[in-house]
């Protein structure tokens, strides 16, 4: 198994038991996601493996912090693929990452909605 | 604390920022390593928490730059204060041993694994605070040490200066002491010689090398020995001063030297006694001259005494001669001249009213015949006997004298005519009564007193002489007084004729 879409316990720990921060973190992820996905797409298109790897590492960090275990796993795969120097599976891995990110965004959106005043 | 965080992952940065703020720290966030380095250069931070992987400047590079800056001299820093130590924590998803070693080698103090564990972060920051506090104390202690070092250096410089001054003064003292034209030595509280100058060598005959460290009374023969010397030392070290002490020293060659010594304590700048000095001058020559002078003075005194004795003897002789000159050689009575001296003096005294002077002129009767019959020696003997009787017959204030030939005179001060006649009669009677061996001897005596008719010594003698003439004319062996009325008659008769 690749883990949870959203590990709530992890998110709670990272936010330090601060629901407001959890909401802010969810909102930040959602806001940053389009630009991030574009970084992956353009790097994939251009075959820029370093940029691809860097973007994957960055997203891996934030997704682990938020408890987005599946996103993090997808990022690890992209990072590993790019590290080989070939990037053969990058296009498919980016597609997979986008799907995982949309799932995660939905899960986070649910939290944002439930915490909304 | 002010904490600089660097992370290109905004989510991780937000989480870290909130966790730090919750712990009460001030946070400045940089979006990557390059921005963090700019922020750090603008204002150094005591704590930096940085992500490992960032574009342009990654975490290890940021660490290395911070450490480089710390090594640089303070003047190149924007701050004049010494660059404070920065505690750097690397945040990373890397967990391999090699990655961690690389991070520490780059200058990180600690590494933490992502995702962030807030509790671990809090614990680490406690450690950070402790380390930084220690570092601050170390810096303060170092500054103190630096100040102390500077002060010590200054003290050392002062000490060195004082030492040089002291050495200069000592050198001057040694030069002065060594070349003094007075024999000098210094000694300690036990009386041991510390310094010994050239003049001391010359006078005592002992070179410096033989005397240093020895008790001075062992070297200076003739000085008080043993306890009295130690007592002397103690008194000098108690502040007493000894001036004008004389003593003698015998050199190794047996030469005797007389010395005059002053001894006094030596004091430092605070007045504390640090030694004693003895200064002696050679008074051998002076002593010898003084002794010679004493001997000469004694000789002079002896000569003076002898001279005085001779003077007294001479005076006696002179007196005797004077007396002899006043006396008649045959009879030892006053002579003619002395008779007149006595008469003059008596006459001067007789000017007092009611105090006349009487004179008796005495002449041996028929003396020429006696001489012719019995010879001059017998005649002389008669004169001596008459003189003796005359001297013993007159009164104490009266003076008998040989007037000339067989004529004698008696001066009787303060005597009126009856008194004078009584004395004259006693004289005449004594001579008549004397048991003359060859034949009876008598005398005729003329007596006169001073008064209205007789006002001068010569007049008095003349008057007495006239009375003697009358006594001779009247048959001798009798006493007659001068009769002024008869004189006046004679004078009238002679003028008439």
Image (cartoon, rainbow, N blue to C red):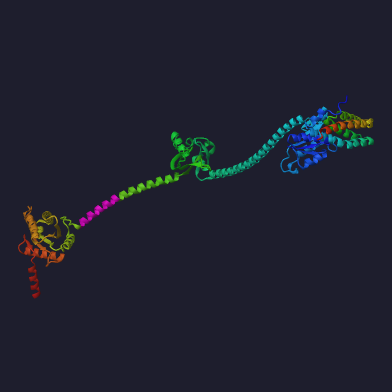
The chief SS type of the magenta part is: helix
Q: Residue B379, image x and y in percent?
A: 11, 56
Q: Residue A70 sits in which quadrant? A: top right
Query: Which residue lies most toward the left here?
Result: B475
Q: Is A85 contained in the magenta span?
A: no
Q: Is residue A117 left or right of residue B364?
A: right
For this rendering, which residue is in front, B262 or B151?
B151
For this rendering, which residue is in front, A30 or A111?
A111
Q: Quadrant of the C terminus of chain B?
A: bottom left
Q: Residue A9, image x and y in percent?
A: 81, 28
Q: Is B309 contained in the magenta span?
A: yes
Q: Is residue B312 above or below residue B457?
A: above
Q: Can residue B155 be seen in this view?
A: yes
Q: Is residue B204 above or below residue A17?
A: below
Q: Residue A31, image x and y in percent?
A: 86, 37
- The range drawn in magenta is B308-325
For this rendering, which residue is in front, B254 or B67?
B67
Q: Residue B90, image x and y in percent?
A: 79, 33
Q: Which residue is drawn at 28% across and 52% down?
A: B311
Q: In this view, does B58 lie to the left or right of B78?
A: right
Query: Which residue lies most toward the bottom here?
Result: B496
Q: Residue B320 sits in which quadrant? A: bottom left
For this rendering, which residue is in front, B335 or B17?
B17
Q: Is residue B364 visible?
A: no
Q: Residue B64 sits in which quadrant? A: top right
Q: Is residue B70 left or right of residue B487?
A: right
């Amino acid at each position: 198994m690749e883990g949870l879409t959203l590990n709530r316990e992890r998110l709670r720990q990272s936010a330090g038991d601060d629901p407001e921060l959890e909401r802010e973190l969810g909102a930040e992820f959602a806001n940053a996601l389009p630009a991030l996905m574009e970084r992956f797409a353009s790097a994939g298109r251009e075959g820029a493996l370093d940029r691809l790897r860097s973007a994957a590492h960055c997203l891996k960090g934030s997704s682990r912090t938020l408890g987005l275990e599946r996103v993090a796993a997808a990022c690890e795969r992209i990072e590993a693929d790019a590290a080989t120097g070939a990037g053969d599976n990058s296009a498919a891995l980016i597609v997979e990452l986008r799907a995982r990110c949309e799932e995660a965004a939905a899960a986070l959106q649910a939290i944002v909605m439930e915490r909304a005043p | 604390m002010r904490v600089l965080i660097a992370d290109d992952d905004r989510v991780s940065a937000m989480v870290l920022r909130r966790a730090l703020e919750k712990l009460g720290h001030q946070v400045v966030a940089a979006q990557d390593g390059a921005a963090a380095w700019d922020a750090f250069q603008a204002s150094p931070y005591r704590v930096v928490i940085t992500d490992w992987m960032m574009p342009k400047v990654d975490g290890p590079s940021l660490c290395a730059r911070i450490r480089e800056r710390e090594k640089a001299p303070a003047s190149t820093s924007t701050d004049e204060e010494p660059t404070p130590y920065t505690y750097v924590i690397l945040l990373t998803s890397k967990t391999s041993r090699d990655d961690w070693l690389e991070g520490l080698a780059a200058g990180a103090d600690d590494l933490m694994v992502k995702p962030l564990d807030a509790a671990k972060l809090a614990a680490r920051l406690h450690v950070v605070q402790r380390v930084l506090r220690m570092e601050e104390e170390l810096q303060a202690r170092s500054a103190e040490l630096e100040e102390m070092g500077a002060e010590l250096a200054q003290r050392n410089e002062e000490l060195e200066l004082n030492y040089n001054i002291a050495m200069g003064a000592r050198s001057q003292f040694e030069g002065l002491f060594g070349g003094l034209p007075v024999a000098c030595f210094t000694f300690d509280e036990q009386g041991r010689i510390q310094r010994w100058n050239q003049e001391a060598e010359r006078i005592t005959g002992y070179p410096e090398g033989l005397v240093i460290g020895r008790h001075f009374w062992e070297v200076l023969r003739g000085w008080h020995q043993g306890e009295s010397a130690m007592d002397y030392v103690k008194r000098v070290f108690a502040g007493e001063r000894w001036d004008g002490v004389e003593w003698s020293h015998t050199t190794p060659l047996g030469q005797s030297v007389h010395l005059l010594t002053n001894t006094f304590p030596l004091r430092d700048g605070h007045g504390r006694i640090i030694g004693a000095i003895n200064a002696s001058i050679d008074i051998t020559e002076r002593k010898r001259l003084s002794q010679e002078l004493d001997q000469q003075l004694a000789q002079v005194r002896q000569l003076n005494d002898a001279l005085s004795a001779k003077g007294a003897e001479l005076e006696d002789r002179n007196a005797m001669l004077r007396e002899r000159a006043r006396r008649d050689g045959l009879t030892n009575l006053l002579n003619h001249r002395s008779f007149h001296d006595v008469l003059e003096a008596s006459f001067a005294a007789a000017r007092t009213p009611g105090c006349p002077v009487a004179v008796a002129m005495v002449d041996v009767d028929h003396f020429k015949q006696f001489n012719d019959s019995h010879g001059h020696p017998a005649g002389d003997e008669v004169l001596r006997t008459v003189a003796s009787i005359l001297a013993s017959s007159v009164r104490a204030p009266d003076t008998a004298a040989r007037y000339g030939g067989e004529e004698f005179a008696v001066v009787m001060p303060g005597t009126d005519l009856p008194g004078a006649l009584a004395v004259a009669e006693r004289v005449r009677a004594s001579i008549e009564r004397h048991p003359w061996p060859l034949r009876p001897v008598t005398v005729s005596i003329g007596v006169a007193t001073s008064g209205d008719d007789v006002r001068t010594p010569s007049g008095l003698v003349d008057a007495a002489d006239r009375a003697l003439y009358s006594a001779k004319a009247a048959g001798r062996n009798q006493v007659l007084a001068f009769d002024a009325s008869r004189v006046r008659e004679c004078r009238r008769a002679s003028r008439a004729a």
